[in-house]
Each structure stands twice: as C-alpha cells, then as structure tokens.
Image (cartoon, rainbow, N blue to C red):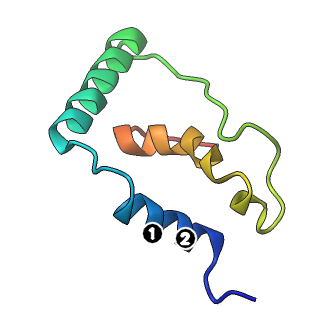
Amino acid sequence: MSNFTLPAIMKLLDDQVLPPVNKEWAEKLTNELKEDLIKTLGDDGVLIFPSSPSVAPYHYSPIVRPFNFAYWAVINALRFPAAQ
C-alpha cells in the first residue's frame, strides 16, 4: 500500500511535469469572463448554475472524479457570491 494518495500524486505531476500557466494570461481570461458575466447579468441578474454535475458524492468518490470541482471553482475564481 502506498503512503501517497492519488490527489497528492496528481498535484506532484501538476507542479513538476506540466508546464506552468502564464499568470498574466490566466488573470486576463478570468477578468474577461467576469466582465462578460457582469455585463450579461446586469445589476439585478441571477445566475442559476449547478453546484455539481451529480448529487452529493459519497466520501472519497471525488478521488476518481477530480475535476468535478470545476463547477464551484469558476464561481470562486471570479469571487462572485454564491448560495445553495
């Protein structure tokens, strides 16, 4: 049995194998998305957005579906308020 979890191994690959993301590009893309959503929603708009692609996961099941976090990661990255 390994002392390392799958998320730790994936993070290691992300940090040491994949090329780094250009910070300026990521910030520009994030700001463009934020401005587009603000323009689309206006002053009193509400975005109905699922918080997950399925029902609440069982314990440890996100290990086999590590990218489902993207549903709430988008709202967090834009620093928009959220309610569930």
Badge 2: how crowded within 10 Å, few (<14), some, or many (20+)? Answer: few
Question: Which amino acid, mark 2?
Answer: Ile
- Residue 31: horizontal and vertical position, in percent? 24, 29
The residue depicted at 45 percent of the width and 69 percent of the height is 12
Res. 12 visible in picture: yes
Q: Position of residue 54 (x, y in %)?
A: 80, 40
Q: Can you tell which quarter of the image residue 23 is in? A: top left
Secondary element at tag 1: helix
Q: Which residue is mark 1?
A: 12
Q: Mark 2 = which residue?
A: 9
Q: In the image, is 52 to the left or to the right of 48?
A: right
Residue at 55 percent across and 42 percent down: it is: 70
Quadrant where the image shows the C terminus: top right
Image position of 67 with respect to 36: above or below:
below
Using the image as rendered, state which of residue 4 and residue 82 is in the foreground: 4
Point out which mark residue 41 bears: none
Do tag 1 and tag 2 residues touch (Cβ < 8 Å)?
Answer: yes
Element at label 2: helix
